[in-house]
Amino acid sequence: MKTVVLLSTRRLPPTYFDTVREDLGNQELSLDVIAWMPPSGYVADKVHTFTLIGPGRMPVAPPVEVVVEADPTEEAPDAVIAPEAVAGPESVVGESDVAPAAAEVPADAAEGEAATSAASAEDVQSTAGSPQPTATPAGAAPTTRPAAKPRPTGIKRVRKALGWRYRRVRKVAGKVLPKAIKTSGPVKFLRGNRASKDLGKTYWGRIESRRDVLTTIEKADVVIALDAGAIWAGWNLGQRRGSVPVVLGLPAARRELDQLKVPAGNG
């Protein structure tokens, strides 16, 4: 079985690894992934190992649903109702029995309750209108304002001023430039190229500092850089380890795998 190491700085879906196997000729391959970002789904059943060296967390396995099938020969027991749970016709209270009881309220009692509720409402309004004294906790220290930070001097002041002017010019330029220029192809290419260079250097630094990742690469038959962020790492690996072919893209990897001869017995 041939071992292939995939270098990637993008978020890969689980179905992508099926495409990799198809593009590489559906050979018996052991895929080891060294990625900067976690995959978009569970991939333990798609690859041999998936090493995450960037931010984020690996997705967990989906829960297994257990379906319990009922035996069709079993019959549900008949429901049994206790006789005392059934109310008799004489225990049901009608509306004609309740209405007279509610109507027998003395008129004097109703007038007294109305007067009491009105007096309570007046007391609440008078209390709400009067100012409430604010209680101060005993022994509390008087509040003091925090001391102001000292202003920078010397070279620090110059750096602060240059940084402020740079941000102001960048903000004004972003508003002045027309949208057609900001969204043009050359500007997008320059921004993407700069971002890829920064990410590529960081990605290669993580690979170089991880002994387990270097061990995985040493055991590979072919190393594939899948995107622009992984090109810098692939170039450095090709310079350091000439015995392991490092290619860009799946078509070049297919040619390298076809040239490899697997000894008999290593199937």
Image: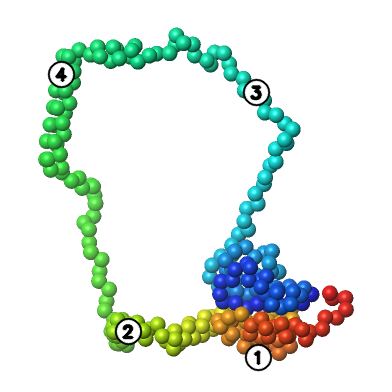
Badge 4 vs badge 2, beta-carbon distance below 8 Å: no
Q: Which residue is mark 4?
A: 111
Q: Which residue is mark 1?
A: 239
Whichever of labels 2 and 1 marks the residue nearer the N terminus, that label is: 2
**Mark 3 lies on residue:** 78
Residue plotted at (67% across, 83% down): 251
Q: Amino acid at mark 1?
A: Gln
Dot in front, 3 or 4:
3
Q: Depth check: give the residue in front, 218 or 59.
A: 59
Q: CA distance from mark 3 to mark 4?
A: 58 Å
Foreground disc of the pair 2, 1:
2
- Cα distance between the residues tagged 4 and 2: 78 Å
Marks 4 and 2: which is nearer the front?
2
Name the quadrant containing residue 57: bottom right
Q: Nearer the viewer, residue 158 or 202?
A: 202
Whether residue 65 is visible, yes or no, is yes
Identify the element where label 1 is drawn: helix
| Amino acid type indicated by mark 2 | Pro
Nearer the N terminus, badge 1 or badge 3?
Answer: 3
Mark 4 → mark 1, Cα distance in angstroms: 101 Å
Q: Quadrant of the C terminus?
A: bottom right
Residue 132 location (% of width, % of height)? 15, 42
Q: Could you tell me which residue is drawn at 67 percent across and 64 percent down?
A: 44
The residue that mark 2 highlights is: 178
Front in this rendered view, residue 144 or 80: 80
Q: Residue at x 49, y 14 (%)?
A: 87
